[in-house]
């Protein structure tokens, strides 16, 4: 079960890497009027749809609850209302059937998806670029993750959405900016490349977003061509930034695993991974560095329940313990233990 943001999803997966069912309801139309996700609307939509999707997925798989081994659910990070809906439903199913409950970190779902789709071996690098996250993680094994870089302000998807809203484009903003950029001149506006040259592996997009606003004001009133040129220049700045920032992580990976016979691989996931210009930039960077670029199918890059079920299957196979029915939702939940220790404690921490 996945209800961490604005997608209500239920899937059935087996440990032989087969997706037996995947039911999903998108809330894009409900939030389009507001130009962004409204948490209260999202939570209510999850509540209205989740039981129907569970019935749909079980019917599609042709299974009864007695045929399942475990219940998996996203317990964080995400919007607290949605997390509560999914987690309480999963707890009810676990209590009623006696099946173990696996409370999954949403980021772990993204981290392990490539093992489902490509049978990837550990270790590998993960670039997660979505509306809520921009991170580079070293994936060493199930439950063994090290965060190398993260955004120090806005996530990349958020920067796309806010740029689109500023320019009066449709929601969701990522696809709208990409469409507009196809007709634009990406060299017209000199936008910044945040943190270029910094030895640390983090990202920053807030300044770039501000530069877009200032650029739009400087040519106001903006024409359709102005918007296309701004979008193209923005997208090029993002591509250059990813090449430079992620490229440093690739070199670190090569240094740490030199002589160990490891196939250097970069996995890219998250909704922003659908952007073709950015994917081409990452492919060129990987080709130049001797890396294999792996991108799961788009429907498994964005929020989905398949990755949550698969993460539980991986944890179960490794003998990792199931979770208690006392487990609480965690709107903030870093994947790597070192970062988690700095976030704080308690139910929300």
Image (tube, rainbow, N blue to C red):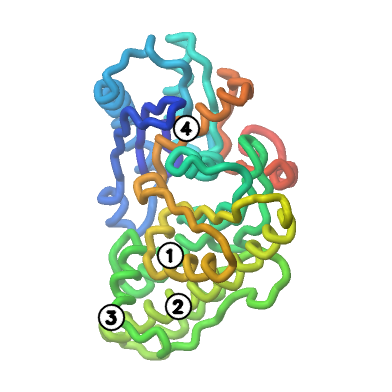
Quarter of the view holding residue 184: bottom left
- Determine the residue positioned at 47% across, 29% down: 73
Give the secondary structure at mark 3: loop
N-term mark: 3 or 1: 3
Question: How many angstroms separate mark 3 from mark 4 (CA)?
Answer: 40 Å
Choose mark 2 or mark 4, whichever is in front. 4
Mark 3 crowd level (few <14, some 14–19, many ≥20, 10 Å Cα): some
Choose mark 1 or mark 2, whichever is in front. 1
Q: 4 and 61: which one is in front?
A: 61
Is 240 situated left or right of 177 in this image? right
- Residue 295, position as x, y percentages in the image: 44, 53
- Residue, disc 4: 310
Mark 2 crowd level (few <14, some 14–19, many ≥20, 10 Å Cα): many
Q: Which mark is residue 279?
A: 1
N-term mark: 2 or 4: 2
Question: How many angstroms separate mark 1 from mark 4 (CA)?
Answer: 25 Å
Is 170 situated left or right of 218 in this image? left
Choose mark 3 or mark 1, whichever is in front. 1
- Residue, disc 2: 236
- Quarter of the figure with the C terminus: top right
């Amino acid at each position: 079960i996945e209800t961490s943001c604005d997608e209500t999803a239920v899937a059935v997966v087996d440990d032989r890497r087969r997706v037996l069912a995947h039911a999903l309801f998108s809330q894009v139309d409900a939030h389009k009027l507001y130009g962004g996700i409204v948490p209260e609307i999202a939570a209510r939509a999850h509540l209205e749809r989740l039981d129907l999707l569970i019935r749909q997925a079980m019917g599609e798989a042709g299974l009864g609850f007695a045929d399942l081994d475990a219940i998996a659910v996203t317990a964080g990070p995400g919007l607290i209302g949605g997390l509560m809906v999914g987690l309480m439903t999963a707890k009810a199913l676990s209590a009623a059937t006696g099946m173990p409950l696996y409370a999954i970190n949403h980021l772990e779902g993204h981290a392990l998806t490539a093992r489902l789709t490509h049978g990837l071996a550990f270790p590998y690098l993960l670039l997660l670029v979505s509306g809520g996250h921009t991170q580079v993680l070293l994936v060493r094994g199930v439950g063994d993750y090290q965060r190398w870089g993260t955004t120090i302000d806005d996530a990349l998807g958020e920067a796309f959405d806010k740029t689109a809203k500023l320019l009066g484009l449709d929601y969701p903003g990522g696809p709208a900016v990409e469409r507009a950029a196809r007709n634009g001149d990406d060299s017209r506006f000199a936008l910044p490349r945040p943190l270029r040259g910094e030895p640390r592996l983090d990202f920053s997009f807030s300044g770039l977003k501000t530069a877009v606003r200032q650029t739009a004001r400087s040519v106001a009133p903006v024409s359709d061509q102005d918007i296309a040129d701004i979008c193209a220049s923005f997208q090029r700045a993002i591509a250059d930034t990813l090449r430079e920032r992620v490229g440093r992580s690739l070199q670190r990976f090569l240094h740490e695993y030199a002589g160990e016979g490891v196939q250097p691989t970069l996995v890219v996931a998250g909704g922003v991974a659908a952007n073709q210009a950015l994917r081409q930039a990452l492919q060129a960077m990987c080709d130049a560095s001797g890396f294999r670029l792996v991108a799961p199918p788009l429907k498994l890059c964005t929020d989905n329940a398949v990755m949550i079920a698969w993460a539980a299957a991986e944890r179960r196979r490794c003998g990792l313990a199931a979770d208690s029915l006392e487990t609480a939702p965690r709107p903030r939940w870093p994947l790597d233990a070192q970062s988690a220790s700095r976030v704080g404690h308690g139910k929300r921490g």
